[in-house]
Image (cartoon, rainbow, N blue to C red):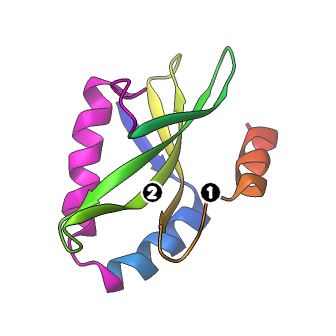
């Protein structure tokens, strides 16, 4: 499984890392789960935002060790044909109500 990041994702990640120092290990755990089951395990923690023949956009909750709860959200694209995951957005639920739909639309246009 290959993982890549959108440039705006990298900026958000850097900002969040300053607040939540466990973010590296938290994301590493999510990557391990994604390697086994990229479309989630059918639980409430994984939501499909868009599905087409070539791409699936999902949102998942991340359990943050710094917070002791799952208040972080990760939006990513899974490309089954390439066995690749592109991280689109990461945010703290307390800062932002929901995902950036415009960013997802922009990603799909560029895809």
Instruction: Tell me what residue is drawn at x 23 percent, y 52 percent.
Output: 28
Q: Which residue is mark 1?
A: 99
Q: Are the two marked residues, 1 and 2, in contact with CB atoms closer than 8 angstroms?
A: yes
Q: Quadrant of residue 83?
A: top left
Numbered label tally: 2
Mark 1 surroundings: few (<14), some (14-19) or many (≥20) residues within 10 A: some
Residue 37 is left or right of residue 100, and the answer is left
Residue 87 within the magenta-colored segment of the rendering: no
Q: Mark 2 falls on what kind of element?
A: strand
Q: Mark 1 falls on what kind of element?
A: loop
In percent of width and height, residue 102 lies at: 78, 56
Residue 76 is left or right of residue 100, and the answer is left
Q: Residue furthest right?
A: 109
Q: Quadrant of the C terminus?
A: top right
Span of residues in magenta = 18-44
Residue 30 within the magenta-colored segment of the rendering: yes
Q: Nearer the viewer, residue 102 or 35?
A: 102
Q: Nearer the viewer, residue 99 or 3?
A: 99
Residue 85 is left or right of residue 1, and the answer is right
Residue 64 is marked as none
Instruction: Tell me what residue is drawn at x 20 percent, y 74 percent.
Output: 66
> Which of pointers 1 and 2 lies earlier in the amino acid sequence?
2
Q: Which residue is mark 2?
A: 73
In percent of width and height, residue 50 lies at: 67, 31
Instruction: Tell me what residue is drawn at x 34 percent, y 77 percent.
Output: 17
Q: Quadrant of the N terminus?
A: top left
Task: Give the spatial CA distance, label 1 vs label 2.
Answer: 8 Å
Q: Nearer the viewer, residue 43 or 18?
A: 43
Position of 11 relative to 48 (above/below) = below
In percent of width and height, residue 65 lies at: 17, 66
Position of 19 relative to 97 (above/below) = below
């Amino acid at each position: 499984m290959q993982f890549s990041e959108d440039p705006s994702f990298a900026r958000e990640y850097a900002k969040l890392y300053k607040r939540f120092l466990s973010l590296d290990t938290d994301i590493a755990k999510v990557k391990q789960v994604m390697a086994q089951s990229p479309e989630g395990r059918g639980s409430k923690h994984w939501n499909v935002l868009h599905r087409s023949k070539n791409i699936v956009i999902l949102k998942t909750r991340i359990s943050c060790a710094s917070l002791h709860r799952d208040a972080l959200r990760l939006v990513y694209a899974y490309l089954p044909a390439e066995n690749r995951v592109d991280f689109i957005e990461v945010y703290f639920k307390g800062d932002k109500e929901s995902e950036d739909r415009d960013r997802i639309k922009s990603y799909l246009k560029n895809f």
